[in-house]
Image (cartoon, rainbow, N blue to C red):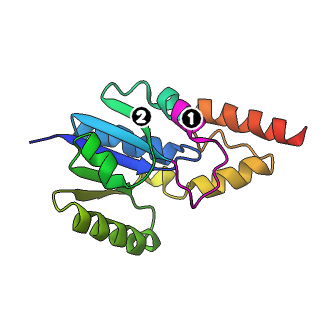
Amino acid sequence: MNKTVIYPGTFDPLTNGHFDLAQRASRLFERVIVAVAKNPSKTPLFDLNKRIELAKEALKGLSNVEVTGFEGLLIDCARQHQAHVILRGLRAVSDFEYEFQLASMNRNMMPELETLFLTPAEQHSFISANLVREIAKLGGNVTQFVPAIVAQALTKLNHNMKK
């Protein structure tokens, strides 16, 4: 049995909640692929290459976690990496309906692909990338919500935007 899971997202930015799920998945699976999406329907704060770079640096201590970028359908990325499980995080019940639709669509297009839902640790359950971006844009301190490398990048980006 293939023990590879793919954890997709835009990770703009990667938060401590994302890190928590990747870390927990690394204990459950032989190989974890963190797949950073180039999502054309979103306007990310960081470009794809920067998000990949930040994720690689933040997750480098997890020996069985790899970071890759992808564009297009998740099922194509899953096939490319021979993953048969998608990891998705659920922070609240409100996330479930959308995630359920995604899981059903992915399974319809790739029947051998299963979706596993994990909830983040309680101390991370309220953190969202959207809120972190907003706090950072307004000059707030985000160090408790994101890995240190991400906090530094957000501070630098905010500083450069003010120039």
- Name the image quarter holding residue 154: top right
Which residue appears at 68% of the width and 31% of the height? 152
The residue tagged 1 is: 49
105 relative position to 55: left or right: left
Within 10 angstroms of label 1, few (less than 14), some, or many (20 or more) residues?
few
Q: What residue type is labelled 2?
A: Val
> Which residue is at the front of the view, 16 or 6?
6
> Which residue is at the front of the view, 42 or 60?
42
Image location of residue 40, percent across then percent down? 56, 56
* Mark 2 and mark 1: Cα distance apart in space: 11 Å
The quarter in which the N terminus is drawn is: top left
Image location of residue 57, percent across then percent down? 51, 26
Which residue appears at 41% of the width and 34% of the height? 67
Relative vertical location of residue 122 with respect to residue 162 in this rendering, above or below = below
> Which residue is at the front of the view, 37 or 116?
37
Image location of residue 28, percent across then percent down? 23, 41
The residue tagged 2 is: 67
